[in-house]
Image (cartoon, helix red, strand yellow):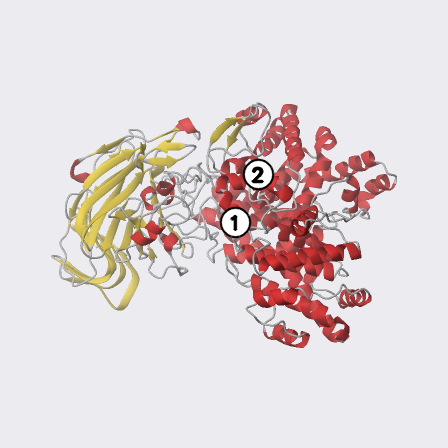
Amino acid sequence: MNRDPYFEPSDEVLSAALAELRADPPGPLTGLTPLLVRLDGGEEPLDAARLLDELDENPLPYIPEISPTPSDLWPAAVRGLRLLIALAEALHDLDDETALALLRALYDHAEFLYCFNVTRCMSTRLLNGAFLTLTGFYLAGFPVAESWRLTGMARLVSHLQPVGSALEQPGILAARDIYGEEWIQRFPNLRDEPLGSLATEVILWVAQRARQAKLALIPAWAEYYHHITGETLRHDRWTGLRVITEEEFWEAIDLERPELADVRRAVENGDDAAAREAYSRYIARLASLRDEYFIGRGTDVDLAEADEICQDIFTLRAHMHHRHRFTNGVDWTLILFRDIESNVSLNYHYHPYVLAMAFCRTGDERYLIRLIDLLRSWLEVSPVPDRGQPLLQWRTLEAGNRSGQIWPMILMAAADQPRFQRELLFDMARSYLEHGRYLLAHQAMFGNNWFQVESTGLGVTALLFPEFKESERFWHCALRRLEWINRVCFLPDGFQAECSTTYHWFPVRGLTALYELARLTGRDLPEEFTDLVEQAMSVYVGIAQPDLNVPLLNDCSPALLSVVEPLTLATKLFPHREDFRYLASRRSEGKPPEATSIAYPHAGYYISRNGWDEDALYVIFDAGYYGLGHQHEDKLNFVLYAHGRPLIHDPSIYQYKHDEFEPYWRGPRGHNAILVDGKGQNRRLLDRPEPRPDPDTVWVAGERCDFGLGWYKDGFATRSIGPVPSEEDRASLDRSIRHARALFIVKGEYVVLADWVLGNGEHTVEQIFHLAPIVEAQREDGVRPGAVVQERNGVVRSAEPKMGNIALIPVFPKRPGVRIETGQLDPVRGWAALYGKQPAHDVTYTVRTTLPAALPVVLWPLPAGQTALPRVTPVAVQAEEGHPVALKVTTDEAADLFVLAPQPASVRWDEGAFDGQALWVRRDPSGAIRHIAAVRASTLTLTGQTILKAAKPQELFERSGS
């Protein structure tokens, strides 16, 4: 890990700060000492020498521990306060060497905590703000102290219970409405001990020091001061994240840059109009990046939607597809259905983006005028607050998305247009500066895609506006944050750790923006950043379905996502990758990957395909990690595609509402899964981290077949509505039942699935399959469930006469009950999330059986117009353990024997013996063996002939011919 020299103070800076400190000592921090003792577990603050010795033994890291919830932020803040108190209490007695060492340590702690406040613990976030505030005011001689002060004050007031005007801020009002008044109680109170008392002491000390040293305070400081003392804080210097006057803006710009000479002259002459005009002309240079940057970035928008936006009809697209008409201008605080994602659609500025792209495409001024109107409206009603906002315009995720992904496209599309320059460009640049400051001060509470998007937004701000004096700070803090969050959020196989096939694209799109803009503007990035972006883009090759869409796994947007756009971008960025080019060009250029079957073992996704053509048989099997966020209870779920369309799919999710649909979308009922006595997977209840890769998973890729097997061993429970399990869910957990699933995929032909439900006693087992709906057009009225028929012996078959179909052929020990449920509301069954809540077919096989039980099913894809099915029969086997199953699949062309077991077993049947885990034997109509594949096998005998005898099990034994 390379430490960025930017965060290291020079000896000259340290010496100057010490000299200033000795000349004007701020005074002791005596009131903090007893409070810190209570916060720090009763330990008295150490003297300077012992603190420095402790630092040598336990140095401060450059980035936090690699965890979504780092536990080293609280200790860093406590130690920082101890260092500061030690310096303050003994300043007159310290020799210069010790004092300089303390200053260096304080500088390191302040920069570390300035960059990182990513934790769900409100107390830690508050303590971070208290330390930065105190350090910034006490060590005002450091050039970066002003940044510490501003960020520290903003953080401290953001993590105290709101008072005064904060209670009327839109984001606070919305959170109180959505989450209830109890949400307010999550914040530390000034009456809380000892943290509230410490915050009180900081507020009072800082108010006094600010008056003495003539340093600026944020307005909220006066409100908390009044709340504590009942008195008005009289002060004449105020600051904040907001740029209120043009004079403040020009002070924040490096007007000494040669390219800003015209701006500088106008400012010096007091001609603000000329300065704005000259500066807007300078920003217009960004339009020169348009042709190159837009490649692969989704510029081909729907002009009909752009026309609707001009009429105040907005399609809200954050996990929904809902058309909403505004009747009195756009309300940027609107929340529909009590679903905050409806507001996300507005405030990440997708709709201005559509207008910008429509203008680029057509040159129609209507779109430009409406774009200016919308952004002007947003800027007028959305001043940046000092206090971090949990919802609406200044939720940090939307701030990062706007600044890093959406606004760059708008600027490049319109910055060279005279109308845009006159009416909007200057104010947009001013807002960009405010976005950067806000993203420095406020962060996500968890290490996930949110923090990635924030950090790339901060970095992109620096790249687009290098003239901001704060841009160097934006840039280096963004890279330091990204070094940490990318280690947390990218698995070694390249998957983003939330394991959502579409959420993967959200942070990666931000990373590609940073990567490409750095290249276009001549800014260097670490080599490992390039490698990470390339590997992350490679995921879209591996998971691409034959129709070039991605399977919708875990939380996804309810719309088809093609890999063509991300891989077009990837081809531009990494032109040596012929596999990127192949799929980006829809197979007209480049070369497909040599491998057809691809594994992502850390994410737990395993993909089988027999080729890279559009008619290939494709299966993706989920046999691993639950995910860092946006998870579904879907381990051992799968998606199957053949004959030109998805046949068995994952219904995904429509809206993030906590209603009766939520347990369906996110629970096992909405997946190709099993239930036992109505209970299913509930990994939300896990009290331990999962190993990655999953040690129980088996994946073997062969020439003509692939085999995958996974286990679910974490218990079955009910699943209540919402993200947090209920006490009833916890009480219902049954850890005695385990589930194993095997998929034996005969490439290009069909799949044999076997479920083993292991446990004791008699239980009701439901095995659920979701037949994919028919997508005739990518809109709400373009999706239908399709035809389905139930045949003898429990066989269920989709029945679209002009399309490929799928037959489910159960091979259970006794005939199962069969239910086909479509668009059912009570209880919720039979739905898909595609441009709306769409009725689709859920097929459920139900058996009442004694455990352990094996439930094999043949998944038989059918080309368009064909209905003939194979004859499937069980084969009796003998085994002392391992619960193997065997079956034959017979057609006019071949007879296939399968032997499958959840773990390697010794199996005997009337014509053979086998030691291994999976076996496929194909014979032609004459009985001659044409192909054999054995997985994790050591011996195989068929009709008295020894086929395989090995000293140790072979991962895959595969042989063709007699």
- Amino acid under label 2? Tyr
Q: Is residue 959 above or below residue 634?
A: below
- Viewer-nearest residue: 772 or 254: 254
Tag count? 2
Tell me the element at label 1. Answer: helix
Locate residue 397, reporting x and y percent.
56, 45
Residue drawn at x 53%, y 41% is: 175
Locate residue 751, reporting x and y percent.
27, 46
Residue lying furthest left? 910
| Mark 1 residue crowding within 10 angstroms, few (<14) / some (14–19) / many (20+) | few
Sooner in the amino-acid sequence: mark 1 or mark 2:
1
Q: Is residue 768 left or right of residue 285?
A: left
Q: Is residue 815 left or right of residue 291?
A: left
- Which of the two marks, 1 or 2, is nearer to us in this view? 1
Q: Is residue 862 above or below residue 678?
A: above
Is residue 294 visible from the viewing direction of this image? no
Locate residue 29, reporting x and y percent.
70, 65
Q: Quadrant of residue 147?
A: bottom right
Residue drawn at x 61%, y 39% is: 168
Q: Which residue is mark 1?
A: 185
Q: Quadrant of residue 786?
A: top left
- Viewer-nearest residue: 388 or 480: 388
Residue drawn at x 74%, y 40% is: 244
| Mark 2 residue crowding within 10 angstroms, few (<14) / some (14–19) / many (20+) | many
Locate residue 409, reporting x and y percent.
62, 38
Tell me the element at label 2. Answer: loop
Position of the C terminus by quadrant: bottom left
- Viewer-nearest residue: 386 or 907: 386
- Amino acid under label 1? Gln
- Name the mark on residue 551: none
Q: Is residue 110 left or right of residue 918?
A: right
Q: Which residue is mark 2?
A: 348
